[in-house]
């Protein structure tokens, strides 16, 4: 499970236009997939919980519902990019600017208060684009990083916060367990 802020439709469309021009978005020969993250799954992870016991899931749901009372989320934007890892572990990401840290800190404080497990590594605000590993030639990856470096998307309020359950595998799937927005 994880708690993440999702992009509004207009931000997603703008970002998709930029991503569509990247080398990593080109169709690849069979066996050379770069595991491009589909637009509907782009998100900004605020906290990764991992496995949560069934009897504790309601605590996580209540935490996310409680975010409704805090008003609009912080103003953020996708701006710049980078990568995590090297070689076969390379992940291509877009960076996120704005006041994400206070929102992430608030979520993590509530997780700690409820004694729910979460990954305590420092928050590195980003949106994962692809996991090309070593399947994308170095020059093409560097070109994509240069394009990302110059990108600045529209600003938005990060208030579409969701508690998600993921099923990992070659094609990960996500299920919404709770949302901080009234829908």
Image (tube, rainbow, N blue to C red):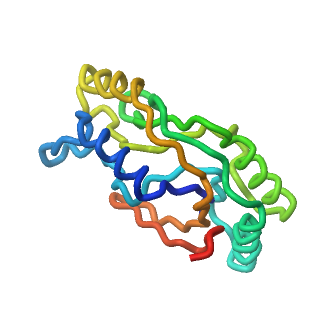
Figure check: 145 above or below 112: above
Query: Where is 37 relative to 147, above or below?
Result: below
Residue 113 screen position, x and y as percent: 87, 60
**Seen in the image, is 127 located left or right of residue 113?**
left
Q: Is residue 41 left or right of residue 45?
A: left
Count of numbered marks: 0
Q: Quadrant of residue 62?
A: bottom right
| Residue at the image point whose x is 61% and y is 61% from the top | 161
Q: Residue at x 50, y 53 (%)?
A: 43
Q: Compared to 111, does 141 lie above or below?
A: above
Residue 41 placement (x, y as % from top left): 42, 58
| Quadrant in which the C terminus appears | bottom right
When the figure is inspected, residue 132 is found, relative to residue 67, above or below; the finding is: above
- Residue at image coords 63%, 64%: 51
The residue depicted at 44 percent of the width and 61 percent of the height is: 168
- Of 174 and 14, the residue lying toward us: 14
Name the foreground residue: 147 vs 115: 147
Residue closest to the far right: 113
- Name the image quarter holding the N terminus: bottom right
Q: Position of residue 126 (x, y in %)?
A: 53, 40
Q: Position of residue 140 (x, y in %)?
A: 24, 25
Query: Can you name the residue that lies furthest to the left here?
Result: 29
């Amino acid at each position: 499970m994880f708690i993440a802020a999702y992009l509004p439709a207009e931000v997603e469309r703008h970002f998709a236009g930029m991503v569509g021009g990247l080398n990593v978005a080109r169709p690849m020969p069979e066996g050379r997939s770069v595991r491009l993250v589909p637009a509907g799954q782009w998100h900004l992870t605020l906290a990764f919980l991992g496995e949560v016991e069934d009897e504790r899931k309601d605590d996580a749901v209540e935490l996310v519902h409680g975010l409704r009372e805090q008003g609009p989320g912080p103003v953020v934007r996708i701006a710049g990019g980078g990568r995590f890892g090297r070689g076969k572990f390379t992940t291509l990401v877009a960076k996120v600017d704005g006041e994400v840290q206070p929102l992430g800190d608030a979520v993590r404080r509530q997780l700690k208060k409820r004694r729910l497990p979460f990954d305590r590594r420092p928050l590195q605000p980003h949106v994962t684009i692809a996991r090309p590993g070593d399947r994308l030639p170095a020059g093409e990856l560097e070109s994509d990083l240069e394009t990302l470096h110059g990108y600045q998307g529209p600003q938005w309020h990060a208030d579409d916060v969701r508690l998600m359950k993921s099923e990992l595998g070659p094609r990960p799937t996500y299920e919404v367990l709770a949302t901080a927005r009234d829908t």
